[in-house]
Amino acid sequence: MNHKGDFLSLLKHADTSHGETKTTRNASDGKLNATLDTLHGTKNAMRDAFQIPTQAPTLEFTEATTVVAMRYNDGIIIAGDRRATAGTSVVHDRAEKVLPIDSHSVLAISGAPAMAYEIARVLKHSFQYFRRSQLQELSVEGKLRTLSRLIRDNLPMAMQGIGAVIPIFALYAPQTDESENGGKIYFYDALGAHFENVDFATTGSGSVWIRGVLRYLDRWGDTRLEQMDQRTATITILRLLDTASEYDAATSGYNAKAEIFPTVKTITQQGVETLPDKYLKDCYAEAT
Amino acid sequence: MRDLPYRWIEAIQDRRDYIEDQLRLGSPVVGLPYAQGSLLLTVTKGAQKIFEVHDRIALSAIGHPADIERLRMLVTDTASVQSFQSATEDVNLHRLTHYVLAHTFKQAFEAIVGEAYIIKMLLVEIGNGDAKTQFTHINYDGNVKVQHDSAVIGGTLEIENAMQEYLTATQTDAERDLNTALQLALNTWAVGKGLSKRFEDAEDNTEVTDEQIHEIIKTELEDGEIEVGILDTNLPADTKFRLLTQDEIQTALGPKNCP
C-alpha cells in the first residue's frame, strides 16, 4: 500500500506488464520489478527507434513555440500559440500548449510535445492521487517538486536534443487572503530547477522577441501588468503573441480565416477558466 | 479445519456474529440521488467518513477505521492506476466492485485463520451521459447489492430495512433539489441511528415518528457533525466530488436541524 500519496511510486508497484493492475494486499509480494515508468519507457523506445547514442554530444534545446504568463489584478493570465512544427514544416495548427493540471494550476509547455504531454498527464494524476489518498491538496511546494522531479527524469532526452521540456507552471494559492493576489508563476530549467517569476514569464522560441516588451510594459507601461483588469491583460497578451509570431516562424498568430485563436486561460481564486473564442475575437478587434 | 466441514461452518458463523456485533453501533450512511447528482450523508464524531475515489465515484463505510482506510486505499489505488493506463472514462464502479473489492472482502471473511474486515461499504457512481446513478452496497462477506434509487448502510440488516422503508414511504421525486435530498437523507439517517440505540436497549419497536426523528437529530448533533459528500454533474472540473462545508449544510437544512 502506498502511504505517501506518491503516484509514481504507485505506478512502479503496479504490475502493468500484463495489462491488469495488481494493487491488492499482495501486490508488494509480486512482480515489483515489472515496473511502469512511462517516461523512461517512452524514452527508451524513441532512443531505439532513432538509434540515438546514449552519450549525446549536444545541449541544444528546440522549443518551437511561444507561451507567456503574467500576473494581472485577479490572478494569472497564461497563453500559448497553437502551432506545432517539425523543422520548417507546420504540422498542426490547433495544438494545445496551455494545459490545466488541477482546479488552480496550469502548465504551459514548450519543447517536445510527446514528453510535455506525458509530463502534464503524470502531473495531473499525481496531484489527483495525492488529494484522494492523503485527503488534502498537495502543497504549492509539493507541486513544484513533483514537476521538478519529472523534468529531471526527462534530462537524458533533453541532452539528446529531442525531448527537452521547458514549461511555465502557474497556479493560484487557494488559501491566500482575498485582498492579495495569490497568483504565482514558476519557470523551470531543463534540469528541473524552478524559479519564481514575480510578474511574468515567457518561454519557447518566440519568447526572445517579447521578453523585453514585457519588462518594458511592467516597468514603464501606463498600467503595470499586475494592475491590469482581465480585458486589458487579455488584449496585452494577444498583442504579445502577435508580436512573437511576426518574428518567429514557429509561433502562429491569430488565424482570422480559420478562426483559430491562441489558448488563453486565467487562474484566479475561483479556479482555472478558459477564455472563450468569442471573447478573444472581441479582444482582437480591440487589440488591432 | 476445512477437512471438518461442520467446524468450518461453525467458525464462519462465529466470525459473522463477531463482525455484526462490532458493526451494530456504526453511524448509518444514506445515499440519495438529486437532480444534478448524488449525495452521501452521515453524522460523524471527528473522523472523515465520506471519500472521493475517482472523478465520478465516492465511498463511505461503517466499521473499523483501519479496515476502512485499507480498503479505501485499495480501491483508490486501483482506480488511479487504471485511469492513468487507460482513461478516466474507463474506470467504472462495476469493475472496481466485482474484480477488486468483493473478492477481497470474501477472501478475508472466509479465511478463518486470518483477520476479517469489519466493514460495510457504500459506493456511488454518477453516470456519464444517460447512464444511471449506481449505488453499490458491499457487505463484509463480499455480498454485493446494486441499487439505483437510493441506498443505505446501517449496523444491522433490520436497521437497513427500516431505513429503506422510511425512504420508500417518504421518497420524493428523483428530480428533487439538493436541499430536499439532504433533508430526506438526514431524516433517514436519524431513523437508523434511533433504531440502533433501541436495539442496544433490547427494544424491538421499529416505528420512528417525526418528533422522534427531530429529537434524535438534535441530540446527536450536540457532539456530532453532519458530513455530506456530493457528486455533482454541474461542477466544472473533471472531478465531480466535493464535501459540503458546514456552512453549506446549515444553510441547506435551515436552523431547525442545527444545534
Image (spheres, grey):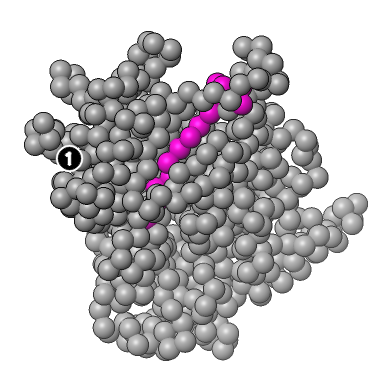
Q: Is residue A113 in sight in this rendering?
A: no
From the viewer's perspective, is residue B161 above or below residue B259?
above
Which one is in front, B131 or B66? B66
Residue A164, magenta (yes or no): yes
**Residue at left 69%, top 40%?**
A12
Task: Indicate left or right for A145 with A180 as reference.
Answer: right
Mark 1 residue crowding within 10 angstroms, few (<14) / some (14–19) / many (20+): some
What percent of the width, then of the height, locates residue A106? 39, 44
Task: Indicate left or right for B114 with A109 as reference.
Answer: right
Q: Which residue is mark 1?
A: A235
User: Quarter-wise, where is residue A56 in the image?
Assistant: top right
The quadrant in which the C terminus of chain A is found is top left
User: Quarter-wise, where is residue B129 in the image?
Assistant: top left
From the viewer's perspective, is residue B21 above or below residue A173?
below
Which one is in front, A170 or A218? A218
What percent of the width, then of the height, locates residue B3? 91, 52
Q: Label 1 amino acid?
A: Ile
Q: Mark 1 falls within which chain? A: A
What percent of the width, then of the height, locates residue B234? 28, 51
From the viewer's perspective, is residue A159 above or below residue B88?
above
Numbered range of the magenta stretch: A159-172
User: Quarter-wise, where is residue B247 in the image?
Assistant: bottom left
